[in-house]
Image (tube, rainbow, N blue to C red):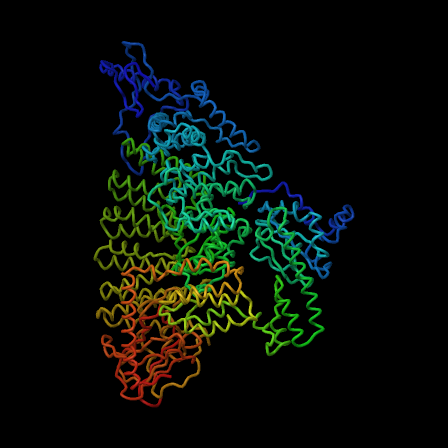
Amino acid sequence: MRLPCCTLDNTGKICYQDGMKWRLSYLVLILVMLLVGYVVDPTIFPGGDKQVQQPTTPQDDFLEIDIHKDEPKPVVQATPKPEPEPEPEPVVVVEDTQEDAEEDDPESAEITKLHRVLGEDRGHRPVKEEDVKGIVRPNEWRKPRMLERKLANHIRTSLGTPDRERVLAFIRDPKNRLQITQWELLHRANMDAFVDLMKDTETADSLAVLLNNLPWISSFVYDGEMEKPEIALAMVQQFRKADENMDRDLLLDNVKVKPGVKRRIAAAVAVEFTRNGWYGAGVPLTKEQIKYYKDTGIPLPDIGSSSGRRKGPVKDNFRLARERYLFFAESWDKGLINTSFGNLPDWLMHFPCGWKGDSPFGTASSMRWQRDNCSAPARAYLDMCGQVPYLPLNKYGDIIFSKYYYQPFDVLYPGLFAKETRDIGAVCGGVSHFGASSACSNGVPAFTMGEPGHCAYAVYVDGEWHPTNTISEKRQPHYPTWGLHRWSALQMMTDMYKDGQRTRDAQMICSLAGLLAQNKNPVKALNLYEMAVTMQPLYNPVWTMYLDTAAKYLSKRPSKYLGVNDFICSSVAPKHPEMCARYLTETIYPTLLSTLKTPKQKMVAFKSYYGNLNENEKAEWDMEKMLNMQFDSLGKGMPAKINFFQLIADSVRRRPSFGPALSWAVRRGYIEQRNVGERVRAMVDKLLEELPKDDPNYEDTKILLKASVIRAAEEMTALSLENSRGSGREKEYYLDLANKYSKEFLKPGENNLPDFTPPPGRLISPGGLVMLDMYAPKQDSIVTHAAALTPQGGAIISEKGKHRKVIVELAKRTNIGGIVIVPSGKDCTAYREWFVETSVDGKEWKLLANLPESSEKPCVVVSVDSASPQARYIRIDSGAEQLQGINFKAILVYDNKKGK
Amino acid sequence: MFVATVALCPAQEPTKPAAPAEQDQSAAEKPSEQKNPRRPETYQDALLAAGDDGVIVFCYGPDWNQRSVRMLQSFWNQAELEKVTGQAVLVAVPIYEYPDEKQADESRRISAGMPPIPFKVCPTVMLVDKNGTMYANLPGMDFLGDEKGSTALKNIADKLAAHRKMLELMKKADSLNGVERAKVLGEIGELPIEKPKNLVDMLKAADPNDSTGLVRRNEHSALKFLYKLMDTKDGFLKVDFHTTLHDLMDESMKVINDKALRAEDRQAAYCLLIGQARREEGGSKRMKNMINASMKIDPNSFYGRAMPRLTQLWGNERANETADERRARRSKEKEDDKHRRQRDREVKKTERNTSVE
C-alpha cells in the first residue's frame, strides 16, 4: 500500500518520506472528506453496500452509560472543501477480490484454484461456507502483523456502531464471520512466533488454504480450546506434508458424512496436542531395545513420553501429534473406524483425536491394536474395560504401583501397552484407560476421570456422556474443560455445543467485543459481551471476559449487578448449579456483595439462586464455599442469619437433592451463638417431620436428609468435645436423632451378629456415642452408628489409613469388664497390630489389649480378668503398620458387674 | 445422532429381515439363495441344521463397521471358507449400533438363542458346537488377519480340527475307565479350544488319587497360587509385607518340580521366587540362577521369552544403589526393628492382665 506522502513498512508502521511530513495535514483532510463521502454514499467502500448508517440507539439498558461519550460524533453533513492536490489513494483497507489476487500473483492464483477445487471435490455435498471468499489474499498470510491490523480495521469499519441488529446482521454474513475468525486467530497468536512460522512462503501459502476456509478455521479457533495457534498451525503443516491427500475425502462415496473429515482431524489433533503440551518425540529407545527389535525383526515401536509435558516444542518435531493425525487419517481413509466418527461435531472429535497423547495408551501402535481388536458398537465400550483382569499383583509378586509390574513383559509387547494391559492385568486406572482408549481408538468419544480413590471413564453414546466403571458421583474428568476438571463443566460445554448456532454466534460476538476492547472501546465491548452472554449463557469464557471487563468499567450500582446475578441464576442454575455457584462466588459476589448494603438486599440475590435450582439435579459437589460466602456476607445480625437458614431449609424442602446444604446448616448453626444453633436444629426437626409422605421419593428423601443431619450432628458433637465448648446439648441432640432415626435405616436381620459368649458383665454401650477420626462418606451409613453399640448391630466404617481410630464414649464412667468387637467381614484375620485403649477423660489413654494376630473367629472378645480399669472412653486403633480402615458391625462394651 | 448409511453392503442380503409371508414368497422366487443348506439365514436354523462340526458365526456391524461389512464379501461369502469348514453351518449375524425398529427386529430374529458375543467386538468369528456352546472365539484382527481372512481360515480350520479331535476323544474316553480314561481326558485339556466345564470333575472321578497328575495339571492356577502365598490383603500387598523368599521356597519348589504341571505354570512359580529374590537384599545371585533355571523349562513360552531381559533389568538393582539410598534403607530397617521390639515388650506387659479370644 502506498500513499503519495508516506508508506507502510512491514510492521505496518507509517514511514514518512523525506520532506514530506508537511503533507500529513492533507492526509487528515482527505480522511475527513472520505468519511463525509462514506456517510453520503456507503457503497464507495468495499462492504459498505451492506451498511446502513442509522442514528445509534445504545443497547445499554443494563449499563446505562452513554456509549458515544468517548467517540467522535458522526458528521452528518459537511461541505467538501476544494482539494489542493489530486485525491490520493485512501488509507483505509481496500478489499481485494480473489480475481484481483489471481491477477496480481500467479502463485496465489494457483492456491485460489486449489481452494476452489477443494470445495468442488466434495462434490455430492457442497457446503456453502466452503465457498466463502474473504478479504484476505493467500499471500497476505506471509505478513501476519499487517494482516491483523487490516482485518481489525476492516471489521471495525464495516461494523460501524455495534447495535444489536447491526451486529446480528454482521455476524450472520459468512464473509464477516471468516474475517472475525481470522482476526481472532491472529489476535491470540504469539505474533513473533507466528511471523517466524509464516516466513517460509511454502508453509504460509499452504496454510493459507486452510486459514481462508471458513469451516476449517472456525473449527480450529472455536470448537476446542485453541492455545498457541502458531504451534498448532506448525503441527498442521507437518500433517499436510505427511499426508498429501489431507484435503481430499477419499472414502466419501458410500458413506454420508460431513465433508473435510481429515482436515477436521488435523485441527482437532493440533489444538489438543498443543494445549496439552504433547510436543515431544517420545522417549528414545535404548540401544538394547533397538537391537532387540532388529534381531527379532519386529518393527520399531513408538513409545509415548511417560515423563509428561515438556517445556516447549521440539523444533520441527511433532512426532506424537503427526502419528496421531496419520492414525486417524489412515483409519478413516481405509474405513477402519466407526463410521459415526465422520459425523461427529467438531468439538466432539477433539475427544478421540486428543486422547492422552503422553500416555502409553495413546501411542499410534497401541491405538492401532485397539482399533483392530476392540472395535464395537458405541454402547459396548461401556463394558469394554471388562477385558482387563483386575490384578493388583503381577506373577512376580510386584504391586501395580511399582515400576516392576509391567517391566518384565514390556519386551513382549513393543508399543502395545493396551494389549499388555489386557494380558497382564491392571487396577481401576488401567482398566478404565483400556475402556476409554478402546472407544477413542475407534473414533468414539470417551475420557477417563478421577473419583475418590478410584478411576472411572465415560463414553459418549446416543448424544450423552455415560459414566462407567464408576463408584461415585464426585467426578473429575481428566479432559479439562475451560481449564476445569469438573464433570459439571463438561456437561455444560456439551449442552453449549449442542446449541451450535447460538454458540457460534455468541463466539463471534465475543470476538467482536474483544476487538473493540482492544481498541480501547470498553463500553461498546461490554455491550457486545452482554449480548453474547444473553445469546449463549453457557459459554463460559465470555462470562469471564464480560465480568472482568465489567469489574473494570462498570459503575458499581447494585441494581445492575443484581440484574446480572438474576440472569446467571435463571439461565445457568437450573441445569448447572455447580457452574452457576462458581460464577457467583468467583466473579459476581466479590463485587455484588460489597455494593449491597443491607442483608435484605443480599437475601434477594441469594434467593435468585435457590429459587432456580432444578429439583432433579443432584448436588454432588462442594457447595460449602458458596454457602459460607453467602452466610458470612450477612454480617452479625441474628435475624438475617436465621432467615438464611430458613431459606436453606425451604430450598431443601422443595429440592431434597440439595440435602447436603442441610448438613452445612446444622454444623454452621453450631459454630454460631448457642441460640442460633438451637433454632437451626428446631428448623431441621420441623423439616424432617413435615416431609410430604405422598411424595413418591419420600423414602429416599427421608434417608438422604436424615443422614445429612445426623452426620452433621455427630461431627458437631465431635467438634464440641474436641474444643471443650458448646452447651453439652450437641451430644443429646445427636443421640436423640440417632435413636429416633437409626432404626429406620436398618433392614431386619441385615446386621445380625454372630453367636458369641459375652463377658459376664452388663452391657453398657447402648446410648453411647461413636466418633471416627476419618469418615468414609461413600461407604459409611452414619445413621447406623448408634445401633452398632447395641446387640442389634449397625455399621461403623472409616477411610483407610494408618492409626485409624474409633472412639466410643460411654454414658457414664464405669469399670470395664469386657469388649466384643464384631467385624463386617467373616473373620478377624485383618486385626494384626490393632489395639484397644481406655481413658477416663478422653485425653490420657491406657492400653487395654492387643487384638489377636490372625483369628478366624467371627468376632473378638476381650475379657478383663482382674484389675478392671475405670473408663468412660474406649478407643480402638488400627495400628501404625497397615493401611486399614475401621469396618465394624458392632462394638459392645460390658462392665465388670455380673448379671444383666 | 448417527446419520451414516452404508450404501455398499453386498452381503447384507442374506440377512435382511422379512415378514413371514414375504419370506415364503422370496423363498419361492429365489430358490438359489435358500438352497445352500450350509448358509441358513438365522442362528436357530443353523443350530437345527448343525452336525458334529457345529455352527460358525460371523458377527459384523452393518451400520458402523465398514471393515466387517467388506469382510462379508471378501472372506465370509467366499467358497474357500466352505471348503475349510467341513460340515459346519455358517451364519452371519448383524450387530447394529443405533438400529431402527426394523433393524432391531432383524437382529433379534437372526441372533435369537445365540451365546453372547464377548464384548460385542466386530468382526468376530465364533465357533459353536451343535448344542449351542461356544468352544472358540476369534475376535478382531489378531485372530482374523487381513480382510481376506487368510489367518482366519487357518485359525478356524485349527479350532474345528481341535473340536473334532475333542469329540473323538470324548467318545474314546466313554469306552474307558480309570487311569486310561483320565489319560484320554487329559488330552482334551491340551486342545487349543475351550475345555468342557466339567473336565476336572471327570478327571477326578476317573483318577481319584491323581496318579497321572492330570487333575493337578488342569486344576492349577498360577494366580491363585500367587495370592495364596503372598502376604496380601484385598489383593494388594500389605504395607508391612512380611513374606520372605524362605517362606515361598517350599511351596514354589513343589510346583516347579511337579512335571505333571504345564511348563508355563511351573515358570510362573519361578516368577514368584525371582520377584521375591529381587526384592530381598543379597538376592541378586539367586535371582539370576533362578532365571536361568526357569528358562530351561521352556525358553519359548510366554515367560521363557521374557526372561533373558530380566537379568539385565534387575541383575544390578542393589549394585546401582547410591550411598545415600543405602544409608536411608539401613536406617529405616533399624527403625523398624526398634519399633517391633517395643511392641513386643508392650504385648508381654498387657498379656499379664488381659485375655483375648
Instruction: Name which residue lies at 40% across and 27% down.
Output: A201
Q: How many marks?
A: 0
Which quadrant of the figure has residue B242? bottom left
Depth check, front residue: A229 or B175: B175
**Side of A568 where A331 appears, left or right:** right
Which quadrant of the figure has residue B44? bottom right
Give percent across and percent down for residue A835. Answer: 32, 77
- Does A776 sit above or below residue A528? below
**Side of B97 where A823 appears, left or right:** left
Depth check, front residue: A2 or A561: A2
Depth check, front residue: B156 or A39: B156
Give percent across and percent down for residue A870. Answer: 25, 83
- Does B97 sit above or below residue B129? above
Residue A221 visible? yes
Quarter in which the C terminus of chain A is drawn: bottom left
**Side of A604 where A305 appears, left or right:** right
Give percent across and percent down for residue B87. Answer: 73, 57
Quarter in which the N terminus of chain A is drawn: top left
